Every structure is written in C-alpha cells, then in structure tokens.
C-alpha cells in the first residue's frame, strides 16, 4: 500500500509535469473497459505465476528477425502487434488496451511510470503492416511522456483499481531479452541483468529489458512473484543462440497450463501467418491449431451407424426387447417403462385390427400430450395404418374440417375429448374409439 507521504510526493511531481499530464489525460479519456483473455478460474490469488515457453520454428524466427532487421525494438513492436491482434480476437472489441514497460533512462533516475498503457485500434480491416505503423507511433509517444505517475489518473479516467492489478490493462508485452543474461533467483525474480537503452531512430523506442520468468530452456515452470505481478498475462521474446523463444507468464490461479499453451500456439500462428502475408487482414487469419481442428472435428462428428431401413414399430420393439425396464415415458403422475408401454401398444393395436384397420387406412389421433397419445401413435403404426395427429387446441371448425377432409377411418381420442369428436364428425363411415 502506498504511504500518504509517497502519494503526496507523486502528486507534487505530477503537478510539475503539465505536458505529460495533458498527454495521458487525453490518452486515457473514454478508455475501453479493462479486458484480457478469458479466465479458466475465478481465484483472486495473484501471488504466484508460471511460465510457458515455445521455441519458434527456425523459418519463422528467421522471418521475424529479418522483418525486424535484427533490432530488439522492432521485435518488441511485432510482439505488441501480435498480442494486440490476439486479444482483439478473444474480446471482439475494435480497440484493445495493452501495457508495455517504461524505458530506463541512461544516467538518470527511473521514470515515474513503471508501465505504460497502450491503446490499439484494431478493426476488421487491419493488416500487420498497418498495425505495426500504429504500434510504432504510439510506443514513441508513450515513451516521450513516460516520466509521469500515470496511475494517479486511474480514478479520474474511470479505470477502477483491481485488487493490486494494473488499473488499465490485463496484458503486458515485455521487451526482448537475451536468454544468456536471463538469470533467475530461486524465487523467480530477475537477477541483475542488462537494461540497455533504445537506440536513436528505433521503430518503437523500446529497449532490451530482462523479464521475470523460468530459467532458460524450460518449457513450463512455476515462479513466485515477478516484476510485473500486476498483470495476469505477460508476453515476451527471448533470444536463444540465433533463434527466438516466445514466452508467456500467467497466473495458475486464473489460467490453466493448457490455456497458456493454447495462447502461445495461437500467438505463434498469428505471427507466422501475418509475417508471411503482412497485407492480409488479421481478422481473416486462421488461428486454429492441429489440436483445435481435432477438437472441432470430434464435436461435429455426429454420424452414427444405422442398421438400414426399419419401420417405426420395429425400432420400438427393439428398444422394448433391449431395455424393458428402462423408463420410456415420465410426467406428472405417471411413469411407464418400455415393457409397460409396449403392452399398452399391443392391446390397442389388436383392437384396431379387430375394427378393420390395416394397410393404407388413416386413423386420426386427437389427444393431449400424454401416455395415451404415444400409445395411439405406436398402435396405429403396428396395426399397419397411418396416423393423422390433430391438436385438440384447434377450433372445433378446424377439427371438423380435418376429420372430414382426411376421410379418417377411426378417431382415437381421450374420454374428456370424446364430445369434441362427436360434434365434429358427420357423415357415414366415421366412428370414435377411446385410447
């Protein structure tokens, strides 16, 4: 917790920097709601973190290094663009907010801001080429105004604090660091490492800076704390003997290891496709991994083997024989097994045959949704006839028309609906039987 004394000093320092204050007030005006990658768990614990890492394919690493002309600042801009585009795909918003580290000042005191919020407009027509230009411009502007206590503006801009987390962003993109100098202590805090300043004229104005994380060469590892503990997700690049490793630090309390690995894979796919086609729309890139495709194919594989053509009564008989004691119908006040329903169907089918129902005979079924309705339908089919379902909620005139027009041989109905049938049925050859 910040002391009153230190808070007072920050307010004095802010008052002495009107140019920086005006810049950040304008930058944070109408700031989008703080959003990150969907969490797997809802734990508020932010005390520990873990790192997942993937070494980039040599062809992808070579393409990125060539695109960045070997400069760490440009590599950082590439990763900021990729992380922003990936966050946009997850949130669906056309503007996302990331954070980047403030730059160390050579020979001077550290800037008053440890991290800088970065707004990125990413519409559906954004390409990597156009996004990189936007990223470079915004990184330069943020670095020029970094000596300001930005978090003092959180309440003023409507960005409420989140239990010790950064009030503006959930995702931070750390600067590129060298694995050879990426020493970590036993608790995972970064040991003394290089903090080289940015070269003049760099693409984005960022510099090499060490990141807290797992030791070199690890794929997944747990660490405690970290210099950027206010961010649930931190992306970074690490150089490894001419190659590149993509790292993601995350909180096991909110994201599962499998989710972290998927985010890494999706970020790599985005970097691969976007760097190969820098003028393609980022929203059109296919970020599905092999595992994603297999999962999708399995979820949509709904075909099941079928034994061939079969009548409804034959399928019903198979189920009765296979699971006679299983519940077939259940509702208010009744519960019938397949054996009980089958017995009812057989009795009514014999009655229908005795009344002359056979092949091609039409039998109307006027009944509420009930055991009697299901019994009547299956009995008509078993007797060889065809059934005509009639909704008892229809107007009497409609019921009368359906019965006359269809020429139904019989009407199966329930006792409380017998009066409806009697008043509706006219003409010779029509009758009624209660189901």
Image (cartoon, rainbow, N blue to C red):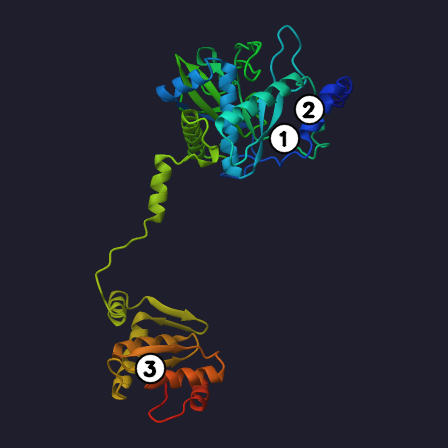
Tell me if residue 67 comes above or below residue 386 in the rendering.
Answer: above
Tell me if residue 354 comes above or below residue 41 in the rendering.
Answer: below
Tell me if residue 250 comes above or below residue 362 in the rendering.
Answer: above
Does dot 2 land on a helix, a strand or a loop?
A: helix
Q: Position of residue 352 (x, y in %)?
A: 28, 84
**Separation (CA) of disc 3 from disc 1:** 70 Å
- Mark 1 surroundings: few (<14), some (14-19) or many (≥20) residues within 10 A: many
- Mark 2 surroundings: few (<14), some (14-19) or many (≥20) residues within 10 A: many
In the image, 185 versus 166, the foreground residue is 166
Q: Please give the label number shown on residue 150.
A: 2
What residue is rendered at 33% in x and 82% in y? 363
Q: Please give the label number shown on residue 35.
A: none
In the image, 84 versus 340, the foreground residue is 84
**Separation (CA) of disc 1 from disc 2:** 10 Å
State the residue lying farthest toward the top: 107
State the residue lying farthest toward the left: 308
- Mark 3 surroundings: few (<14), some (14-19) or many (≥20) residues within 10 A: many
In the image, 359 versus 47, the foreground residue is 359
Q: Is residue 418 visible?
A: yes
Q: Are marks 1 and 2 in contact (CB under 8 Å)?
A: yes
Q: Quadrant of residue 142?
A: top right
Q: Position of residue 252 (x, y in %)?
A: 49, 32
Q: Quadrant of the C terminus?
A: bottom left
Q: Which residue is mark 3?
A: 363
Q: Please give the label number shown on residue 168.
A: 1
Mark found first going from the N terminus, 1 or 2:
2
Q: Position of residue 290 (x, y in %)?
A: 34, 35
Q: Position of residue 47 (x, y in %)?
A: 55, 28
């Amino acid at each position: 917790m910040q002391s009153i004394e230190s808070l007072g000093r920050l307010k004095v320092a802010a008052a002495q920097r009107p140019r920086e204050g005006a810049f950040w007030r304008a930058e944070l005006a109408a700031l989008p709601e703080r959003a990150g990658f969907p969490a797997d768990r809802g734990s508020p614990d932010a005390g520990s973190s873990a790192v997942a890492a993937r070494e980039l394919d040599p062809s992808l690493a070579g393409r990125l290094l060539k695109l960045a002309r070997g400069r760490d600042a440009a590599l950082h801009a590439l990763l900021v663009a990729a992380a922003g585009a990936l966050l946009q795909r997850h949130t669906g918003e056309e503007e996302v907010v990331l954070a980047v580290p403030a730059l160390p000042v050579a020979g001077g005191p550290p800037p008053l801001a440890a991290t800088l919020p970065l707004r990125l407009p990413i519409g559906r027509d954004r390409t990597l080429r156009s996004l990189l230009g936007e990223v470079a411009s915004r990184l330069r502007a943020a670095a020029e105004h970094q000596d300001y206590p930005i978090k003092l503006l959180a309440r003023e801009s409507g960005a409420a604090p989140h239990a010790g987390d950064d009030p503006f962003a959930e995702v931070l993109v750390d600067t590129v660091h060298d694995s050879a100098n990426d020493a970590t202590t036993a608790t995972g805090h970064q040991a003394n490492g290089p903090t080289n300043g940015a070269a003049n004229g760099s693409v984005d104005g960022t510099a090499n800076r060490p990141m807290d994380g797992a030791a070199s060469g690890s794929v997944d590892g747990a660490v405690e704390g970290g210099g950027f503990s206010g961010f649930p997700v931190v992306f970074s690049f690490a150089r490894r003997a001419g190659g590149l490793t993509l790292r993601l630090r995350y909180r096991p309390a909110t994201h599962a290891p499998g989710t972290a690995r998927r985010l890494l894979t999706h970020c790599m796919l985005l970097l691969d496709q976007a760097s190969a086609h820098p003028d393609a729309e980022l929203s059109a890139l296919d970020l599905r991994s092999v595992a994603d495709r297999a999962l999708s194919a399995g979820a949509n594989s709904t075909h099941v083997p079928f034994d061939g053509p079969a009548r409804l009564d034959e399928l019903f008989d198979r189920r009765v024989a296979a699971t006679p004691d299983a519940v077939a119908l259940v509702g208010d006040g009744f519960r019938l097994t397949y054996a009980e329903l089958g017995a009812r169907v057989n009795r009514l089918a014999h009655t229908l045959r005795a009344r002359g129902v056979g092949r091609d005979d039409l039998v109307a079924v006027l009944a509420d949704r009930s055991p009697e309705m299901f019994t009547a339908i299956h009995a008509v089919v078993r007797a060889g006839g065809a059934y005509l379902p009639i909704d008892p909620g229809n107007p009497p005139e409609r019921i009368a028309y359906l019965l006359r027009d269809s020429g139904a041989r019989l009407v199966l109905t329930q006792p409380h609906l017998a009066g409806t049938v009697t008043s509706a049925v006219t003409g010779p050859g029509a009758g009624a039987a209660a189901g």
